[in-house]
Image (cartoon, rainbow, N blue to C red):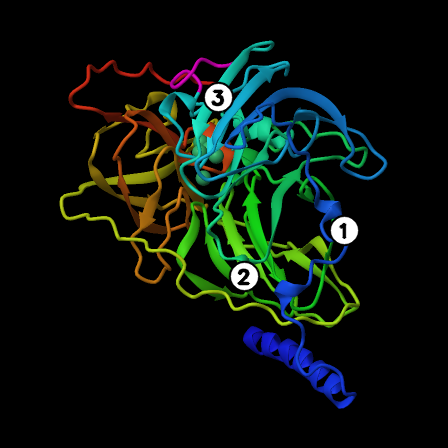
Amino acid sequence: MRANAWKWSWLFVLGAVAACERLGEPPSPQPARDVSQPAGWADELAMAVPTDLDPDPRVLEIEIEARVADVEILPGTTTRAWTYNGTVPGPMIRAKLGDRVIVHFKNSLPEATTMHWHGLRVPNEMDGTPGVTQPVIETGGEFRYEFTLRDAGTYWYHPHLDSSTQVGRGLYGAFIVEDPADPPAFGDDLVLLLSDMGLDENGELVPADSGGNFGDLFGREGSVLLVNGKVLPTLKVRTGKQQRWRVINSTRARYYNLRLRNHRFMRLGGDNGLAARSQDVYNLILTPGERADAVFTPADPPGTNNVLRWVPTERGYGSTYNRASEQMLAIETVADAPVAPEPIPAELRAIEPLDITAATQRTLDLTIAIASTVEMGVNGVPYWEAKPLEISLGDTEVWRIVNNTDFSHPFHLHGYFFQVLDETRVPEWKDTVNVPTKSELTIAVRFDERPGTWMYHCHILDHAEAGMMGHLVVRDPGAPYTPPPPPAHHRH
Ligand code: C2O
Ligand code: CU
Ligand code: CU
């Protein structure tokens, strides 16, 4: 059905071309590469950009200050948010593969925090895990983060302490690593950072523990949907002129199923940049923490309005009950003549399957115990009681991740990308994957470098905080070993 809609919209373009021919106008639409996006096409989606303090083009040196600031989210109201450099989202960091990044981080929040670079393969001591890779950054404290960008792709940054609360108040930002070798046919780059905020009608944040145990169990979804910090912004497009969308789900708990009437998307990849092949899909699905990289080819006739919608997605008990779809991003197709889109290559990247013949096998069972509080864990043990998984440097492991709970869990691993062992998927490297309720999946990981203590957890941040989180120690057998300190328990 959707495929038909797609074909019909292209018949429209061809029809318009035929009509032009009859009028003696040029026989085929201009190629997309010869025209630009409509003037001011993404103005409403602009995010703050940090100042680069280093003149070297291969070094991005910036300052990020976490602080409380008043921002306007609901028009005409003021929200006292937690921000990076005063904006929600924080500044968009954009650099190229191989660049060096230095972040002078200062914490001016009333509480301690840390910064985590979700998906980036940073040195262990830059990972932002409190009490493990670094001490927490107290109010007034500073930390210098520094690393080289080893992987192109779409990433993001967020705090790793009391993260459900801190992310919920507005602490997140996009981090884009460009690959100059990407084909121009992908189109003009547009970052769509999706978030939600729990706000009352006066724009005030609802309490971080709203919903009590139920909030922990379901995961807290904010009532207001934001794209790049805005409620229902407008994007201007031209029929046939491609855009490369880099979509990031930075919410605490919300799953996104993105649909646009009359359209399909050409998915290029996600967490770690390009997948093996491009894939024609009718929706984009993102769990918390995940990214999607996709070409959007506007197919509506000139002068049309459309809207990108959030559609309820099953993520366990009651998650779609009585919920309607919601508008997220208005799409206005300008009056300019249609252009002919560029073909997207089918093969994008060589992704060799990991050799798992000698892999260590483990089972991680994601568990929920409901007593006077909701206690989540892995193999029945909450984070603060769990022993770290011990892994030898250089080993490949195969993890069966089992979910017998009533909720779906987006499983996230720090430090290493993994492959999902599932023949039906287009091969790609991932750092976050959905484990649907009452199901299991298997991933393969190679712990090839950067020994140290890393984390894994459910990226529904309320679940992580409720205990569904753990450590793993990648040990270099040739080096002296000090076990990590026991994890701190931040709640209760
Ligand atoms: Cu984005 Cu430990 O997480
Ligand atoms: Cu992470
Ligand atoms: Cu979970």
Distance from mark 1 CB to nearest ligand 1 atom below 8 Å: no
Tell whether label 1 touches label 2 (CB within 8 Å).
Answer: no
The magenta stretch spans which residues? 130-137
Residue at which label 1 appears? 40
Q: CA distance from mark 1 to mark 3?
A: 34 Å
Residue highlighted by disc 2? 185
Q: Amino acid at mark 2?
A: Ala
Residue at 54% across, 23% down: 103
Hey, what amino acid is under mark 3?
A: Tyr
Q: Residues within 10 Å of mark 1 (few under 14, many from 20)?
A: few
Mark pair 2, 3: CA separation: 34 Å
The part of the image, by quadrant, that contains residue 431 is top left
Left or right of residue 351, residue 434 in this image: right
In the rendered structure, does residue 181 fall within the stretch colored magenta? no
User: Which residue is found at the position 64% from the left and 13% from the top?
Assistant: 110
The answer to whether mark 1 and mark 3 are in CB contact below 8 A is: no
Tag 3 or tag 2, which sits nearer the N-term? 3
Q: Say left or right for 449 vs 328.
A: left
Disc 3 secondary structure class: strand
Label 2 close to label 3 by CB (< 8 Å): no
Within the magenta stretch, is there residue 136?
A: yes
Residue lying at 51% horizontally and 42% vertically, measured from the top left:
288
In the rendered image, residue 315, in percent from the top left (x then y), is placed at 50, 50
Q: Neighbour class for label 3 at 10 Å: few (<14), some, many (≥20)?
A: many
Q: Position of residue 97 (x, y in %)?
A: 45, 40
Q: Which residue is mark 3?
A: 145
Q: What kind of residue is marked 1?
A: Gly
Under circle 2, the secondary element is helix
